[in-house]
Image: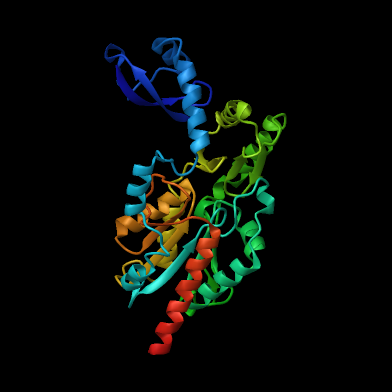
Amino acid sequence: MTNQKLVIPDAKSGIPMAFPIAMPDSALFPLSGNRLPLKKLLKKLGPNANGARINALLDSMRASSPTRRPSDAEDRASWNLHHPSALTMFEEIEAAATGKQIVVFLDYDGTLSPIVEDPDRAFITSEMREAVRDVAKLFPSAIVSGRCRAKVYDFVQLTELYYAGSHGMDIKGPSKGHKSQKRGNQTVLCQPARAFLPIIDEVYKALIEQVKHIPGAKVENNRFCLSVHYRCVEEKKWVELADQVKLVIKDYSQLRVTHGRKVFEIRPTIKWDKGNAVEFLLESLGFDESSDVFPIYVGDDRTDEDAFRVLRERDQGLGILVSKGPKETNASYTLQEPMEVMDFLRRLVEWKKVSLFRQ
């Protein structure tokens, strides 16, 4: 027997899905070229294959974002060694950032606000807002979220920031703040997926209708992408919800489905994510080819991994994953919850003020 991770286009939707399935060596076949429809493939693999598919899907939905690693004591100790607390290692971060222009990127849900059952009530505390405001006074700063840009602004209500909504597909610069954050008198605006707006609106209406019979399911229109939340859906209904989402998306080759924290994300197929948003913002600030910039990205979701990866590839700055337990990540450091994020931001401000005082 050989354990294979098969990437199979679903027979109904055509959406690629990865399933770990134990296969006899004689049953192996190339997955490139003409691929078998899922129903035929499951029949070929035997009666247990459909159960394997459902179990794999459920495991993925439970683990969510990013992929969780085993949490035994030895693994946790090893993970903590390679991804230490950004608070414990703050002096190390100070040393790396000294003499460089820090640029701060922050996810919203799970980073600045706690994860809540109702996404419309993911409010930021006044203390966190003040911490973010203080950071934005000293460093170019941005909120990079899967949420609609306008909705994130309504939560944060700070004019000093960049706001990159819809996973970076809707970016607007601050109305006040650092001079380096503006091109002349114009705030930066980037909307690479504008052509998809009519399709996204159409799919949003279809999803509302398709999942309305599933208690707890919530469809959120983030303008350039859609979110189908299942945090309040009973686990026994998760697979049914996934099937309903795929049923709607199957006729829209312009859209793709990705996974976040108890949420399906429906996005345009263009190559644009939070990593691209970080690169765009750094370029807009004039730091695209600079060796004197130190980006710091703090996020908790699988979608933030795109930004962590960009910073690793640039070999500049660092990523900080907000997580209470071991997960697969490209981040260098960790924080456990939004309260620790606020503590980190305050320490960053204090360090910068002391540095300015000494100059």
Farthest-out residue, left:
25
Q: Which residue lies at the image location 46% right of the left edge and 59% below the top edge?
A: 298
Out of 122 and 310, give the one closest to the viewer. 122
Picture quarter with the N terminus: top left
Residue 106 seen from this side? yes
Out of 60 and 201, give the one closest to the viewer. 60
Total number of numbered discs in the rendering? 0
Above or below 284: residue 271 = above
Going by the image, does 266 lie left or right of 94? Answer: right
Q: Which residue lies at the image location 55% right of the left edge and 48% below the top edge?
A: 195
Residue 60 location (% of width, % of height): 48, 33
Residue 164 seen from this side? no
Colour convention: rainbow
Above or below 144: residue 76 = above
Going by the image, does 189 lie left or right of 284? Answer: right
> Toward which corner of the image does residue 228 lie, by quadrant?
top right
Residue 57 location (% of width, % of height): 49, 28
Above or below 57: residue 128 = below
Residue 230 location (% of width, % of height): 62, 37
Out of 65 and 71, give the one closest to the viewer. 71
Picture quarter with the C terminus: bottom left
Q: Which residue lies at the image location 49% right of the left edge and 38% below the top edge?
A: 63
Going by the image, does 270 lie left or right of 239? Answer: left
